[in-house]
Amino acid sequence: SDPPISDSIHIIEGWVKITLAGLIHGLNGSKGLMQSNFYTSNKEKKKIELRIKALNPPEFKGKVMIIYTRYGSKLMDWDNMCSTAKFPFDGLKNNKVIVDDSPEYIVQFTPKQVKCRRKDQRTEIIITNI
């Protein structure tokens, strides 16, 4: 049996891949961003921020490209899927991995989805220097 997916980081010259195990909530559903109050949302945001910090990722000082891939047992509508990037992007910015999550610094954002088994659900974020 395969080992369970866990948070991890892979660093290669000029780029980094951050893997966050499990699913990150989108807009919809009982735990979605549209249903959450400020306290609940902020708590979830802080959890993701701490998970990113624990990986000790390098800092990117300028413009970057990001490939954001959600591996889930169900595929989502694109607007909902892209909303799952909100807390990880805030976590990257607040941990100074990226300067800012604006288009001035993330000059290319590529969202992807891959259907997988429930036990393999995760989010992978690849950040590349421009």
Image: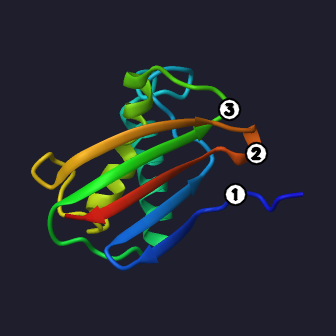
Q: Are marks 2 and 1 in contact (CB under 8 Å)?
A: yes
Label 2 CA crowd tier, 10 Å (few <14, some 14–19, many 20+): some
Q: On residue 119, which mark appears?
A: 2
Q: CA distance from mark 2 to mark 1?
A: 7 Å
Q: Quadrant of residue 82?
A: top left
In which quadrant will I find the C terminus?
A: bottom left
Q: Position of residue 113 (x, y in %)?
A: 51, 35
Q: CA distance from mark 3 to mark 2?
A: 9 Å
Label 1 CA crowd tier, 10 Å (few <14, some 14–19, many 20+): some
Label 1: state its secondary structure.
loop
**Above or below, 34 relative to 2:** above
Q: Are marks 3 and 2 in contact (CB under 8 Å)?
A: no
| Residue lying at 66% horizontally and 61% vertically, measured from the top left | 6
| Residue lying at 75% horizontally and 38% vertically, measured from the top left | 117
Q: Nearer the viewer, residue 121 or 36?
A: 121
> Left of 91 or right of it: where is 103?
left
| Residue lying at 38% horizontally and 49% vertically, measured from the top left | 67
Which of the two labelled residues, at mark 2 and mark 1, occupies the earlier sequence position?
1
Which of the two labelled residues, at mark 3 and mark 2, occupies the earlier sequence position?
3
> Left of 101 or right of it: where is 49?
right
Label 3: state its secondary structure.
loop
Residue 55 shows in this picture: no
Q: On residue 5, which mark appears?
A: 1
Q: Nearer the viewer, residue 56 or 82?
A: 82
Label 3 CA crowd tier, 10 Å (few <14, some 14–19, many 20+): some
Q: Amino acid at mark 2?
A: Lys
Q: Amino acid at mark 1?
A: Ile
Label 2: state its secondary structure.
helix
Q: Amino acid at mark 3?
A: Ser
**Above or below, 15 relative to 118:** below
According to the picture, the residue beneath numbered tag 3 turns out to be 73
